[in-house]
Amino acid sequence: MNNETIKLLVKENKYDEALSVCKAMLEYCDLNDRPEILRMRAYTYSHMGDYLRALTDREEVLQLGECTLKDLYLTADNALNLGEFKLASSVLKDLLELGAKQNEHWFDSAAYFELSYAQMELGNYKESLTNLEKAIDVEPNCAMPLPSQGMVGYEKLKREITRRMNKL
């Protein structure tokens, strides 16, 4: 069994089968293979909407020291879906810092946009606005699906940040 098999099972909504495959692979895998199997199990959990278990697996991948930029981004995304805004904010900052060091920027607009949202939820409105502007500097038409918000664009998020600031 490989990643494509698990992805196919997930696509067919055969989550229990995908999880069984992951479990069997984890029982007999070499330590070097563990991160990739955890990624696939997290992928399965995410598609099931079980963001807590997905986040647990993604955090283990990070702890194993095998993290990629995609791992950081998906960890932050799972944290956002759980309302873990402080964790999401921290991971997104790590992602942006590592991406800058590696001269990789494919995720910048999304990361800044999600960081803006997380900072808003934490009550850090000035930082939230700063990160929103950075997202728009990278991608002027940036819009993202945000947990319990649906698709949100620049203007909508800016209005919500401003509304919350004015309540202070």
Image (cartoon, rainbow, N blue to C red):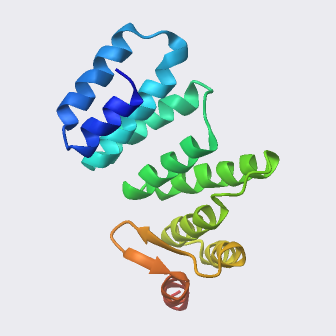
Which of the 4 quarters of the picture holds residue 29? top left
Which of the 4 quarters of the picture holds residue 66? top right
Q: Position of residue 148 (x, y in %)?
A: 33, 70
Q: Position of residue 167 (x, y in %)?
A: 49, 89
Which of the 4 quarters of the picture holds residue 5? top left
Residue occupying image coordinates x 40% and y 33%? 40
Q: Position of residue 139 (x, y in %)?
A: 65, 75
Q: How many marks?
A: 0
Which of these two is toward me, 1 or 66? 1
Residue occupying image coordinates x 64% and y 79%? 129
Residue occupying image coordinates x 58% and y 64%? 110
Residue occupying image coordinates x 55% and y 15%? 32
Q: Position of residue 154 (x, y in %)?
A: 55, 83
Query: Compared with residue 94, is residue 126 higher up or lower down, i.e. above or below?
Result: below
Residue 35 as seen in the image, left or right of residue 8 = right
Query: Compared with residue 50, is residue 89 higher up or lower down, i.e. above or below?
Result: below
Residue 150 as seen in the image, left or right of residue 59 = left
Quadrant containing the N terminus in the rendered view: top left
Query: Compared with residue 65, is residue 59 higher up or lower down, i.e. above or below?
Result: below
Query: Compared with residue 97, is residue 131 higher up or lower down, i.e. above or below?
Result: below
